[in-house]
């Protein structure tokens, strides 16, 4: 089968289209015929070799990149009884930048019928990060006021929509060219950070700092009593110095930091929100599988509006 492979760590130029054996599902696995796969900063981190203790010291231990996926079930392992060939699914697979990929059953769920494969492919990493930040760490409730920075990026565009679905008043913070998109996805108030300071405008019950660039002191000053700042620590969570510094700061009860976890209940919640129309993934660009290096370069060199996707 065709797949995007990487034999050495480096930049996007180390990704190339090649032929590899089609994977086979284990007892609790699902083999997916990939219809679309989304790129994430995680893929860049792995590609550059920044977490080699997990991915192989000298070269990538798994040569096919990609996590987020949407597609059609091709086959299932003997322990999988609730999915079968022909079912449309989304979630996380090992090596999704390929024609076929294998994923654990608990990391794949039925795809909402109202979404395209390209839209569904972008849900998993960004959507679960946004859900975890707002529901679990901010503990967002109806009627609360939340500010979301990086509001039109991959994680931010999900966060705005999830916060609205949970009944919050949402202030979106983004660049000039993305102001209208922020309004379209449901923000009640939008700040162009190149022209105005959202932290001086009002106080918030929660701030999801998904874009960075402001000090913790500034963020905390803009909170209501009992409010919380939730920091998107990004994908490079292995950076020891940053981790040690965060531990010292994050003992404060009004600051939370987290890393992404893909869990089936979260995927099902995101599917529910998408099926009901509360969440619609934003897709910036779609590339053919052979142009995955260009897609990766675009992801890292620009500020995508929503997700960047590749299709076999």
Image: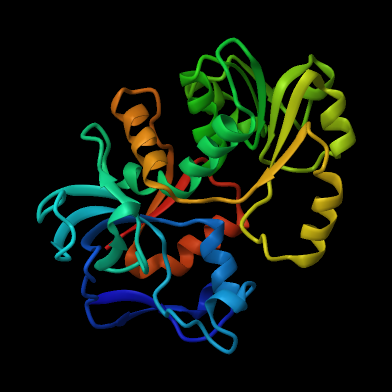
Q: Quadrant of residue 56?
A: bottom right
Residue 212 appears in view:
yes
Residue at 73% from the left image edge and 65% from the top image edge? 239
Residue 231 location in percent, x, y?
70, 41
Horizontally, is 190 left or right of 269 in the view?
right
Residue at image point 78% right, 27% down = 195
Q: Please, is residue 28 above or below residue 260 in the view? A: below
Q: Position of residue 126 (x, y in %)?
A: 50, 45
Name the residue: 32% across, 53% down. 106
Asked whether, in this view, residue 273 is left or right of residue 162, the answer is left
Q: Residue furthest top?
A: 143
Which quadrant would residue 245 be assigned to in this image?
bottom right
Residues 245 and 34: in front is 245
Q: Is residue 10 left or right of residue 224?
A: left
User: Which residue ends up furthest to the left in the rendered image?
Assistant: 85
Residue lying furthest front: 79
Q: Which residue sits at x=59%, y=79%?
A: 10
Q: Quadrant of the N terminus?
A: bottom left
Q: Is residue 11 visible?
A: no
Q: Is residue 70 above or below residue 266?
A: below
Figure colour scheme: rainbow
Q: Is residue 191 above or below residue 24?
A: above
Percent from the top left, x then y, of residue 122?
40, 47
The image shows residue 4 at horizontal and vertical percentages of: 37, 74
Q: How many marks?
A: 0
Relative side of 141 to 233, left or right = left
Q: Where, quadrant-wise, is the C terminus in this rendering? A: bottom left
């Amino acid at each position: 089968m065709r797949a995007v492979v990487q034999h050495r760590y480096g930049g996007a130029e180390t990704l190339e289209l090649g032929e590899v054996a089609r994977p086979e599902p284990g007892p609790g696995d699902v083999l997916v015929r990939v219809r679309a796969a989304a790129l994430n900063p995680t893929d860049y981190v792995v590609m550059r070799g920044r977490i080699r203790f997990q991915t192989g010291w000298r070269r990538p231990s798994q040569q096919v990149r990609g996590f987020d996926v949407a597609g059609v079930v091709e086959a299932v392992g003997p322990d999988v009884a609730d999915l079968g060939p022909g079912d449309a699914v989304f979630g996380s697979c090992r090596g999704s930048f390929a024609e076929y990929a294998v994923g654990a059953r608990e990391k794949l769920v039925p795809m909402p019928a109202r979404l395209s494969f390209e839209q569904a492919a972008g849900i998993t990493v960004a959507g679960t990060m946004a859900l975890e930040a707002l529901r679990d760490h901010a503990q967002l409730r109806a009627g609360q006021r939340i500010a979301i920075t990086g509001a039109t990026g991959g994680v931010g565009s999900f966060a705005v929509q999830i916060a609205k679905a949970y009944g919050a008043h949402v202030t979106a913070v983004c660049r000039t060219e993305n102001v209208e998109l922020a309004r379209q996805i449901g923000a009640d108030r939008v700040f162009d950070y190149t022209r105005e300071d959202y932290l001086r405008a009002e106080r918030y019950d929660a701030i999801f700092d998904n874009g960075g660039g402001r000090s913790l002191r500034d963020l905390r000053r803009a909170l209501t009593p009992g409010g919380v700042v939730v920091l998107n620590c990004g994908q490079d969570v292995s950076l020891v110095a940053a981790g040690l510094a965060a531990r010292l700061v994050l003992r404060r009860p009004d600051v939370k930091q987290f890393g992404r976890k893909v869990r089936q209940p979260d995927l099902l919640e995101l599917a529910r929100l998408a099926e009901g129309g509360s969440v619609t993934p934003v897709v910036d660009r779609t590339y053919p599988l052979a142009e995955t290096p260009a897609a990766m370069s675009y992801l890292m060199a620009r500020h995508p509006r929503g997700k960047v996707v590749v299709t076999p």
